[in-house]
Image (cartoon, grey):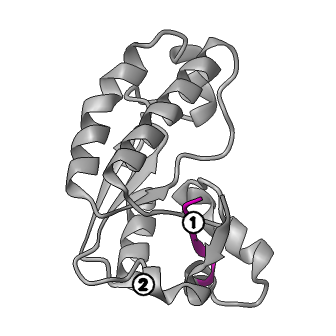
Amino acid sequence: MRESNLSENRAHSLSQPGTILLVLMSNPPSTTTGDRTLRRVELLQALFGIEESLTANLFAIPTYRTGEISDVGVDATGWLNARPAIAEAMDHCTAIMLAYGGQEPSGPARTHFREQIAWAEQLIESRKLPVWSVGGRPLHPSRWHRFTYSNYPGVPFHDALVRSVVRREST
C-alpha cells in the first residue's frame, strides 16, 4: 500500500464536511486520565475541521506503559473485550486514524495483537473506511511531536502535524 501526503491528496481530504474520525489507539491508561492524549486528538480535530472524533483501543486492559501489554495480554480476554467498542466506533465513523503505536508486544501477547490488527483491518475493509496515520505509521498521539520535530525541523508543530498526516491508499 502506498502512502500519500495530505497536501498532495486533497480529493480524499481528512477535512471533508461531516468527518467523524475514529482514533484507534493501543489501550487505556492506568494512572492518568489520558487528557494529554485526548488534547492531541482534539488538536488534530481542530486543525482539520473534523466534526467529531471518537477513540477506541485495541486492548481493553489499562496499563501504565504499553510495554506492559506483553505481560497482561497473554490471554485473549483483554483483546476480545475491546472488540465491541471498536466495532461500535467503526459503525459511527467515516474515517480511521491509526494511532496504536509501532511496537508490538512480545511473547504470546504478540500473537493476540496481530490477530486483533487483522480483525480490525477486516472491519475497516468491509466498511470501506479511509485510513490515516501520522508519518505513514500508527504513531500514538504522544509521539506525534517527536515525529514532526525530527521530520520537519524548524516548522511549528501545528503545521508539521498537518504535513505529516497521510492517507493509506487502496491497492
Residue 51 position, x and y percent, is: 24, 76
The disc placed on residue 114 is: none
Q: Looking at the rendering, in which quadrant would you find the C terminus?
A: bottom right
Residue type (three-letter) at the residue carrying disc 2: Leu
The residue depicted at 58 percent of the width and 72 percent of the height is 166
Residue that numbered label 2 is attached to: 47
Q: Residue at x 71, y 67 (%)?
A: 147
Q: What residue range appears in magenta?
A: 163-171
Residue located 53% across and 60% down the image: 141
Q: Quadrant of residue 123?
A: top left
The image quarter containing residue 149 is: bottom right
- Disc marking residue 169: 1
Q: Looking at the picture, how far across and down is residue 155, in whole percent? A: 70, 90
Is 122 left or right of 56, judged from the image as shown?
Answer: right
Q: How far across and down, in percent of the image, does residue 111 sit? A: 61, 19
Residue 151 at least partly seen: yes
Q: Residues within 10 Å of mark 1 (few under 14, many from 20)?
A: few
Relative vertical location of residue 27 with respect to residue 9 in this rendering, above or below: above
